[in-house]
Image (tube, rainbow, N blue to C red):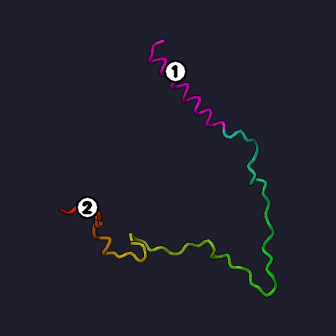
Amino acid sequence: MSKGCREVVLLTALVVSTVLAGCSGSGKKGSPAYFSAGTIPPLQVPAGLDRPLRSNSLLLPEQPSGPFPPPGMDVEQMAKPPRIVGGSED
């Protein structure tokens, strides 16, 4: 067997063994633990208190459109190149 052919066979064997090792997983069988998780009962609100509002709990605030700088950043400062500190001036 020529050297080039031997290298191709070894490379193919390496690739196949790597793919098979990656597909074998961690060896655990069955469903993940969270598949069997149950639900909890709804929140019981004590008398005299209000149930928390959840309708807006996952809403994101409105974002401005366009390439605006972060709040508090000076726009004029952004247009200037950075100052280089520590250079030698003779």
In the displayed structure, does residue 74 sit left or right of residue 57?
Answer: left
Q: Quadrant of the C terminus?
A: bottom left
Q: Which residue is mark 2?
A: 87
Q: Residues within 10 Å of mark 2 (few under 14, many from 20)?
A: few
Q: Which callout, 2 or 1, points to the residue nearer the camera?
A: 2
Chief secondary structure of the magenta span?
helix
Residue at 31 percent across and 73 percent down: it is 77
> Residue lying furthest left in this view?
90
Could you tell me if the residues under marks 2 and 1 are in contact, i.e. CB atoms within 8 Å?
no
Helix, strand or loop for disc 2: loop
- Vertical comparison of 48 with 19: above or below: below
- Vertical comparison of 22 with 32: above or below: above
- Residue 43 falls in which quadrant of the image? bottom right
Q: Which residue is mark 1?
A: 9
Q: Nearer the viewer, residue 77 or 29?
A: 77
> Residue lying furthest bottom in this view?
48
Residue at 40 percent across and 70 percent down: it is 66
Separation of marks 2 and 1 at Cα, in angstroms: 57 Å
Helix, strand or loop for disc 1: helix
Q: Nearer the viewer, residue 87 or 15?
A: 87
Magenta span contains residue 52 = no
x%, y% of residue 20? 62, 32
Give me the disc on residue 40. none
In the displayed structure, does residue 66 sit left or right of residue 62?
Answer: left
- Residue 29 falls in which quadrant of the image? top right
Q: Start and end of the magenta stretch?
A: 1-24
In the displayed structure, does residue 67 sit left or right of residue 45?
Answer: left
Q: Residues within 10 Å of mark 1 (few under 14, many from 20)?
A: few
* Three-letter amino acid code of the residue under disc 1: Val
* Three-letter amino acid code of the residue under disc 2: Gly
